[in-house]
Image (cartoon, rainbow, N blue to C red):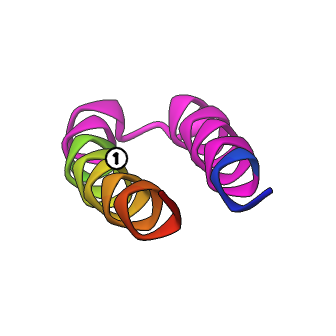
Amino acid sequence: MVAHGLLMAAFGSAFVVMMNKNFCSAAENLQMWLLRVEEEMVAIYCMVR
């Protein structure tokens, strides 16, 4: 399932970012990345329906 794969990738990236010493900028980057993934997931969901 595509959405599940994206979700696992997001959690994996979040974990890597949490281990990052430069947390603040990493957290900002992660937020932007998650927003983009969310938009893609919505687009995929709408296409599949």
Give the total number of marks visible in the rendering.
1
Residue 35, percent from left and from top: 23, 48
**Mark 1: which secondary structure?**
helix
**Residue located at (75% from left, 55% from top):** 5
Question: Is 12 a magenta residue?
Answer: yes
Residue at the (54%, 29%) spot, across then down: 18
Position of residue 47 relative to residue 24, above or below, is below
Quadrant for the N terminus in the image: bottom right
Q: What stretch is highlighted in magenta?
A: 5-28
Magenta stretch containing residue 34, yes or no? no
Residue shown at 45%/55% (left/top)?
45
Q: Position of residue 2 (x, y in %)?
A: 70, 62
Question: Is residue 40 rendered to the left or right of residue 9?
Answer: left
For residue 22, which quarter of the picture?
A: top left
**In the displayed structure, does residue 21 sit left or right of residue 40?**
right
Of residue 1 and residue 28, the one placed in the foreground of this image is: 1
Q: Residues within 10 Å of mark 1 (few under 14, many from 20)?
A: some
The residue at which mark 1 appears reads as 34
